Amino acid sequence: MAQQPTFWPPTDPRRSWARGSDPWRSDPRRPAYPLPTPSGLFPSGPPRPTYREPNLVHAGAVAAGCGAAAAWLLLFGLLGQDLAGYGRWTLLAGVVAWATALVMAQVGDRGVAAGIAVVTAAGWSICAVVLGVAWTVTGDWPLW
């Protein structure tokens, strides 16, 4: 025996909308929340939750962190008398700057921390390239 297809809403003539029996609300398969009307192009379900960042990162804060870290690395790099001194001072200034960025990320402005971290990484990369070129040209590692 073939099973009869089910239609929604139920079309039982004994249940009338006028008598207060609402098959839509009494059906256990119906979800408890109202569904949006689908467009028909894609199947749709309940709306997804929206998460908001409580501490936004602004471009001005990132720029301030970039400028502060660039000035910090420049001043410490100028303290070196030769290439080895430049490398050591830049490494020390970068460690202090990253420690400051970690503290700023935890309790301060994360935009400033991101700017400090990006410029410090760029400063260390420039220092590594300069030391590598000097090592290639002279054949002696400049930091020893």
Image (spheres, helix red, strand yellow):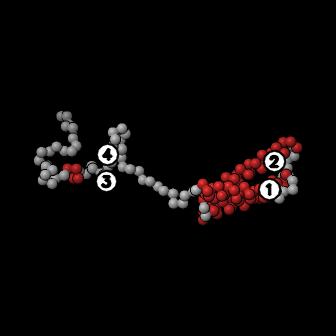
Secondary structure under the numbered disc 3 in the rendered image: loop
In the image, is 93 to the left or to the right of 13? right
From what the image shows, is residue 6 above or below residue 74? Answer: above
Residue ranking furthest to the bottom: 107
Instruction: Look at the picture and state if 76 lies above or below 130.
Output: below
Q: Earlier in the sequence, mark 1 or mark 3?
A: 3
**Residue 116 x %, y %:** 67, 56
Residue under the image location 88 percent in, 43 percent down? 138
- Report if residue 94 is visible in the image: no
**Viewer-nearest of discs 2 and 1:** 1
Find numbered disc 2 in the image and state the secondary structure of the residue it sits on: helix
Inter-mark Cα distance, 1 to 4:
63 Å
Q: Which mark is residue 26?
A: none
Instruction: Count how many numbered circles sit on residues in the image.
Output: 4
To which residue does mark 4 refer? 37
Work out how far the residue at label 1 is from the one at label 3, CA to CA, in angstroms.
63 Å
Corner quadrant of residue 44: top left
- The disc, 1 or 4, on the residue closer to the chain's N-terminal end is 4
Q: Residue at x 74, y 59 (%)?
A: 72
Q: Position of residue 123 (x, y in %)?
A: 73, 51
Q: Which mark is residue 33?
A: 3
Q: What residue lies at 80% left-to-right and 56% top-to-bottom? A: 77
Circle 4 residues within 10 Å: few <14, some 14–19, many ≥20: few
- Separation of marks 2 and 1 at Cα, in angstroms: 13 Å
Question: Mark 2 or 1 closer to N-term?
Answer: 1
Q: Kindly report the distance in space between the C-alpha atoms of the residues bearing marks 3 and 2.
A: 64 Å
Mark 2 belongs to which amino acid? Leu
Q: Nearer the viewer, residue 81 or 63?
A: 63
Which residue was labeled with disc 2?
A: 131
Q: Amino acid at mark 4?
A: Thr
Taking 136 as reference, is 123 above or below it? below
Q: Earlier in the sequence, mark 4 or mark 2?
A: 4
